[in-house]
Amino acid sequence: MDSDEFAAGVSRFRMLVRRQDMSTPQSRNDQRKQVSAGAMTSMLALEAYTRARVSRDDSHLIRLRVSAVNGCRYCAAMHRRDARKDGWSADRIAAAEDWTAHADEFAADEQAVLRFADAVTRIDGEESVPDEIWDEVARYRGESGAGQVLMDVVTINAWNRIAIATRKDPGSLRGLIPSDLEPTSPR
């Protein structure tokens, strides 16, 4: 990705933030929903970075699972919509969110990515992400790829925390269908 592509990506994400009113309070009651424009610029740069380096399928797995683990309704709805638009079935989306109950539906490399996402999301001290979990992702995605997957997990965890703390309404997202808001259980 060259600097022009990166700048264009950041510009698109800034427009998205303005559309979602994440950085500009509308009234005194919306103060909780205000996020510093400078902080959002950094988040959008991180978002652009991971989108350019992590496959769409891995990113869908990561973002669906992490949003489910964190209980972020806003991000879960957004990523269900995005995965659906990329051709994912409702069953695959629901299985990704609860992958440990549906591990047989995922290839070994996908399971490695999901296991890694769980470990990083549920971090609790130095031993939370054992070498075996890192090495497994590196075996399938390469050492550099493992680092990129890590950054995607970190990014969605940050977005989840922003959306939960600012009480983003999933109903405000465009292009949703009812199952994006309340997914069906996998078969």
Image (cartoon, grey):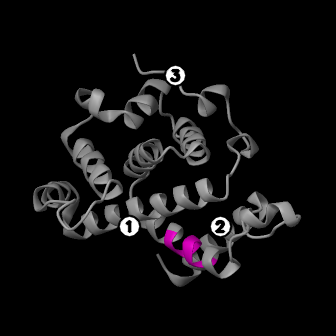
How far across and down, in percent of the image, does residue 185 sit? Answer: 46, 21
Residue 17, label in figure: none
Residue closest to the far left? 132
Write down the residue under mark 1: 151
For marks 1 and 2, the one nearer the N-term is 2
Disc with the residue nearer the chain's start (3 vs 1) = 1
Q: Quarter-wise, where is residue 23 in the image? A: bottom right
Say few, some or many: other residues with alpha carbon within 10 Å of mark 3 (under 14 / 14 to 19 / 20 or more): some
Mark 2 crowd level (few <14, some 14–19, many ≥20, 10 Å Cα)? some
Amino acid type of the residue that numbered disc 2 sits on in the rendered structure: Phe
Three-letter code, disc 3: Thr
Vertical order, 165 against 181 (above or below):
below
Q: How many marks?
A: 3
Taking depth in this image into account, of 107 and 73 the one nearest to the observer is: 73
**Residue at the image position 50 percent from the left and 26 percent from the top:** 90
163 w.r.t. 64: above or below: below
Residue at the location (37% across, 50% down)? Answer: 58
Residue at image mark 2: 13
Q: Where is residue 158 drawn, in percent x and y?
A: 50, 63
**For this rendering, which residue is in front, 51 or 119?**
119
Predominant secondary structure, magenta span = helix
Nearest to the eye among marks 1 and 2: give it.
1
Q: CA distance from mark 2 to mark 3?
A: 30 Å
- For the magenta stretch, what is the residue range? 41-46
Q: Secondary structure at mark 2?
A: helix
Disc 3 element: loop
Q: Position of residue 25 (x, y in %)?
A: 82, 67
Question: Identity of the amino acid at label 1?
Answer: Met
**87 or 167: nearer the viewer:** 167
Marks 3 and 1, how far apart at CA:
29 Å
